[in-house]
Structure formats: structure tokens, C-alpha cells
Image (cartoon, helix red, strand yellow):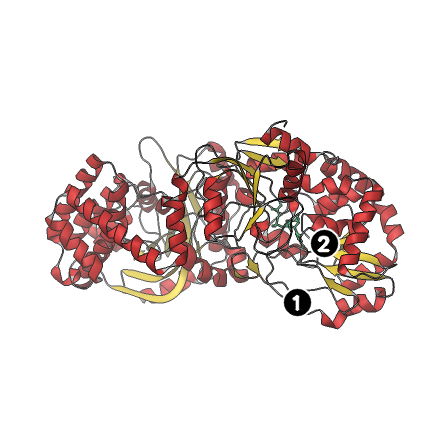
Amino acid sequence: MEEAGTLKISVIIPYVNENIYMDDCLDSLEEQTCRDFEAVVVCDHSSQETIDRLRRREVSFPITILELTGQRTGVAAARNAGTGRSRGEFILFLDCDDYLEKTALEELLRCMAGDKDIVRCGLRDTWYGRAVYYDNGEELDARNNESASGHKEEMDMTVLGLLIRREFLAQQDITFDETYRYYADLPYVARLLGSGGRVSGTEKILYLKRKHNDPVRLPSLSQIPDDKNKIQEVLRAYCQMKSVLSGEEENILDEKFIRYFMNKIAPWFLTAEREEAEEVFGQFLRCCPLLRDEAVGRVPADARKLFRYAKGHSTAKVVRKLRRTRTVKTWGRVIRSRAACKKYLYQKVFQKMKLRENMVVFESFLGRSYSDSPKYIFEYLSQREPGRYQCIWILNKKISLPYPAKCVRRYSFRYFYYVARARYFVFNNRQSRDFVKRDGMVFLETWHGTPLKKLALDMGEVMASSPLTKQEVYHHACEWDYLIAPNRFSADIFRRCFLYKGKLLETGYPRNDILHLGSKERQERARKTRNTLGIPEGRKVILYAPTWRDDEYYAPAKHSFHLQMDLGMMQRELGSEYVLLLRTHYYVAERLDLSEYRGFVYNVSDHDDIAELYLAADLLVTDYSSVFFDYANLRRPILFFTYDLEKYRDILRGFYIDMEEELPGPMLFTTQEIIDTIGNLDRMQERYKERYHIFYEKYCGWEDGNASQRVVETVFGRG
Ligand code: C2G
């Protein structure tokens, strides 16, 4: 270690490759209220370009950039190298994907109160970067951590969030064991706690530990699945830790170890190769005599029993017992819960039955409507070859379909039966999590829109539903055989954002075929829809179809929506000439009370097919929904009500296109602006004529009314 200078704290940051989270990490240092610190960044075999970029970054605190070279690699080596070059009186380890609260260094120093050796603070897991976390991520985290992380890591002793006196480290000669890849913190922390140092701390959360939402491309160490090496490291660390800990610290360690056995080692045994299991089991048995009875008595009864059994039996017997326990648990669930029973039948019975070659299952928007491209593919297929295919529609409501098909509710017994047996599955969203693709099945993913908002793996933060959406989308996309692209722009994005390797059908959207019917037929269909909705003759129609907001939700796919359009004002100003069709996104669960505006506002959120509404509408108002890419096929006026543009663009999602440059209509921020623009539609259209033309060529150029035919011919053959 270098001689201590006048600096108070050295913050040591191991840096791996091009870690996208590093900016937040350094920004959080920049904003520290305590200014008496330095940062020591240790690059672990990073590219020269990455290191140069880091060097160019301007910071207002002293920063040293080191490089690990040769054989030396890993977090342990980086932290040791950083410690060796640090100059502060105290040391704090900060991972490059994590960040600190503004007052972290100041408050930790205060807890040191002159004579402590180690101070620890509260630590919180977060899925979000600073911008989102401080916006409303704290709240979202509380929900998501429950749903996505399951139980907390059993062996979670970490050096993160500790401020350590450098002199104490030197006196005790404590360093990280560089032979560890995943669990170097364990023996290090055990040495710290077992060396008689003076410890203090605060419960306050000062350290934010960021969980990675993209474990496909950037897994954190803890997201790498448990394998033999990881488990063996824990077993090794456990033995080392036992030799330095005592008293309550030792009891806590033993408890954690038994839980680790129960939740990690035991499940792994069920999938491991026999020889590997034997080897790990041998190592586990060598740990057992070290456990204190007192700690064994403190864990839940099932863990205790299993643990005691494991100590006295062979690997084969333990594995058999684990299997028996799993079977008993499964049957318990099957007897108690209908959902578990359906799943069991699906896996153990229906999936074993023969695939039905001519069976096609259709699903649109998670079974919520008869609509979108699956509808038009179904109709084309049924028309072209009546009776050849047995069609099944997943629909959560009763409606009569124009061609023969069985309707089943999503997640009903019949649903599980058909999705297990049908050869073809045509759907426009992701497949359900329970769905297992069998050999010989053909998945046709139609998707549901040209992306304006960043999608799947291209998203930065994930605020809606599961924080691990990216990983799930990726696994789903690996199963798609065909994916429809409405235009070149989408084709390129889909390849990248889903890491999609299957066949792309560059056909345009079947759902837009209807928009290219002859003008007479279009008028006829529009008239029908207006009649069904009860729109008075002679009134022009505004369709307002906004999208959903990632951060406003009650539960996954059940979002709230706060209407920002002043409907009273719209009615007063436009009510004599227009009616307004309000169409919320299908994720929006809110039932808006619109009775006040009867005769002017029509709630068309439950209307199945938005394409029919497009035909009936004289103009569209939307925000960031993909609906405008489709509506543009009609070349009718489009207005954008983008009252929360900055938040949506900069925090919630980010966009693929520069809206200011490309949109075929104006962005408006108040109801008054909407009213004024509708009052001068001709002028607005004239202003956007050229831009609309360019937009049409780029996004609607593939659409000609025959997309269903092209898709059906490719997937089902020429008939
Ligand atoms: N939709 C609708 N009514 C709305 C909004 C959307 O019927 N008020 C339908 C449209 O068919 C639209 C599709 O749902 O094209 C997707 O809606 P988006 O608002 O674009 O949002 P999202 O579901 O997030 O899909 O690549 C497209 C993206 O995935 C966006």
C-alpha cells in the first residue's frame, strides 16, 4: 500500500469491459457532499478504447486509473490492486455498476467517530439507474424485488457498503483471495469481522446495488447460474470463514450455510451429472462437522431435517429423497390448486400426446380481442382453404367469428390442451411463460407495431412488469420460427432488439390489409362501424388512441391511465362538428367514467379491432403509440398529444426516431393546441405534406393489401 496522504477516503472501483452503468457510478461520486476522497479505478483487461474513454472523462476529484494485465483478473485481483495504490485513510469498495447516495461518504465518516476500524451502512438492491431511482424507482423496486428476486442470496456477506480503516487492513494483513471468482467477499469479510476490529454502522441506505436487467448480454456474477464451480467456491469459503469467526457471527454463518444447502445445493443435485454431484457432495460432507448444533436448531424444520438426512447418507440416497420430496410437493400443489393441476396435466399428459398437424391456435393481445394480424391471417387462411385447418382462438370473451373456430379462454383446461397439441401457433405478443415449445411446432410471431419506443433488449431501464423482461423476451424470441416485419425500419430493429435469428417475413402487416381495400369497401366498413357505435350522421370523428405508461401500473399488464386531455373543453369547442372516440391501450385497466360527455365522447376501448376504428376516423390523435404508423396508410391527418414527452423519452423509454424530424404531424402539449390545430386542419396538412409523403414511403411502403396472402403462403404453403 502507498503511504497515507492527507486524503480521507479511497473509493476503489473494479471496472470490467465497457460497463454501461459506470457513468452513474462516477456521477454519484461527483455529487458527494464529502469532497475529501479519491477514486481508484482498476480496469480488468478492458480495451484500450474503453480505458481512453475513461481517461477523457472529466471529474472534479482525484482519479487513478490502473490496469490489470497478464494472468491477473477478477474482482478480487482488481480490489487488491486498487488497495495497493490507494492513499486514503479509509477504503470503500464500490462496484462499477452500483452507486452511492450523495451523503454516503460524509455519513460513513461520521460513524467512524475517530476510533472505529469498520463502519457499515444499509444497502439496497435496485433495478434502476439514478435518474429513474430518484424519480420513482424506489417504489417500483419495492414491488419488483418481491416478484423477481425470490429469496435473498443465502451467502450474502459483502464488502460493499463498508468503510474500512486502511491501517487496520495493513496490520491484520487482510487481502482478497484471488483464487475466488464469485465469492471473494466471503473470506475477506470473515477476516474483517473476526480480527477484533472496532465496528460501528448506520442502518441508513447509502449504497445502491444495481441488479442487471439484461443478464443475456451483461450478467452480474450473481446472475450466472449456479454450477459446480460456484457451489464449490461457497463450500471452500465456508471452511475458511469458520476458522476465523466465532460467537454470534459464527452462528449466523452456519444458518446461512444450511439455507444455502437447502435452496441452492439441493436443487442443483437434482440436475447435476452423477460424478459432479458425488464430488460436490464429498466436499459438503467435509463441511458438516464444522456446523454448530445451536445454529442447526435455528433453521426451519424442513431444512433441518433434510440437512441431517444428507449428513448420514450417500449421494444417490440424498438425490432419491430430494426427488421424492419434490414429487410429494408437486402432488400437494396439484390437489390444492386448479392452476397447478392444469399445469401438471399440460406437462405430463397433453404434451405427451401426438401433435395435430392441421391444428392452428390464434391469439391476439393475450386473448383479449379478436383483432390484429392473427385475425387477418385466420380469415385469409379460412377463406383460402375452408375446412383444411382446425382453428382454435384464444379469447377471453364470447363473440361470434366469421369462420369456423373453437374459442377457448386463456389458461382454461382446454387452452392447455390445445396449446400442447397444435402444430401452429399464431400470436402477436409474447407466448405465455408456461408455454413449452415442442419439437415440430411452428411459431408465427406477428408482433404488434412498428416500434417508436425502444423495445426489448434495446430498452435502457425496464419499469413495466417483470424487471427481467429482456431476458424473457430473448428466450421467447429464440422460439419464434417466423416474425413479421411491416417495413425495413422495423425489420432491422427486430433483428437487433430481440437478437432474432429466425425467418423474418418482410411482408407488411396483415392487419393493415383492410386499410388498402378499394375506397367503396372502405367507406362501407366505416359506415358499419359508425352505425355499430351509434355515431350520428354528419359528425366527423376524432380517434384518440394513446399508449400506456411503463411506470403507472397496478400489476403486470394492468396499468392505470391519467387522462390529460380536457374533454369538457374539447366538447365545448368541437362538439358541434365532431365526436371523439377514446381508445385506451389494452394494458390499461382503468374504467374511465365518461358519462359527463355523453353524445361527444365514445369509449371504444373494448372495440376488438382498432383497424375498423381507423377506417371510421377522420383524424387520429395519439402520443407514442405505434398506431400512427398504421393509420398513416390512410394518409389522413395525425396529431401528437405529447404532454409528457421529456419524461417518456428521457426516463421511461427512449425512441428510435427523432420525433421532431420525422413525425407526419405536429407535437402538441395542451388541449387548446389540439383544438386550434383541428380548427385549421387544412393549414396543418399543407405544412406536413412533404414530411407525410416521406414518412409514408419509409413506413408504409410494403403495405399493399396482400400481406396476409404473402404470410400464409410462406408459412402454410401455397395451398
Ligand atoms: N393499440 C390499440 N389502442 C391503443 C393503443 C394501441 O388498439 N390505444 C394497439 C395497436 O394495434 C397498436 C398496438 O396495440 O399498434 C401496440 O400498441 P402501442 O401503443 O404501440 O404499445 P405497445 O403495446 O407497447 O407496443 O413494436 C411496437 C411496440 O411493441 C409497442
| In this picture, residue 335 sits left or right of residue 417 | left
Asked if residue 629 can be seen in this view, the reply is yes
Q: Residues within 10 Å of mark 2 (few under 14, many from 20)?
A: many
The CB of the residue at mark 2 lies under 8 Å from ligand 1: yes
List x then y, in percent, for residue 448: 62, 45
Q: Secondary structure at mark 1?
A: loop
List x then y, in percent, for residue 208: 42, 57
Q: State the residue at coordinates (79%, 53%).
A: 528
Compared to residue 392, the image places residue 399 above or below, namely below
Compared to residue 585, the image places residue 219 above or below, namely above
Q: Quadrant of residue 551?
A: bottom right
Marks 2, 1: nearer the viewer:
1
Q: How many marks?
A: 2
Q: Quadrant of residue 65?
A: top left
Q: State the residue at coordinates (48%, 44%).
A: 419
Q: Disc 2, disc 1: CB below 8 Å?
A: no
**In front of the other: 417 or 312:** 417
Outermost residue, bottom side: 596
Outermost residue, front side: 387
**In front of the other: 67 or 356:** 356
Asked if residue 61 can be seen in this view, the reply is no
The numbered dot on residue 592 is 1
Classify the position of the C terminus by image quarter.
top right
The residue beneath circle 2 is 622
Q: Secondary structure at mark 2?
A: strand
Amino acid type of the residue tagged 1 in the rendering? Leu
List x then y, in percent, for residue 184: 28, 46
The CB of the residue at mark 1 lies under 8 Å from ligand 1: no
List x then y, in percent, for residue 584: 66, 58
Q: State the residue at coordinates (84%, 66%).
A: 575
Amino acid type of the residue tagged 2 in the rendering? Thr
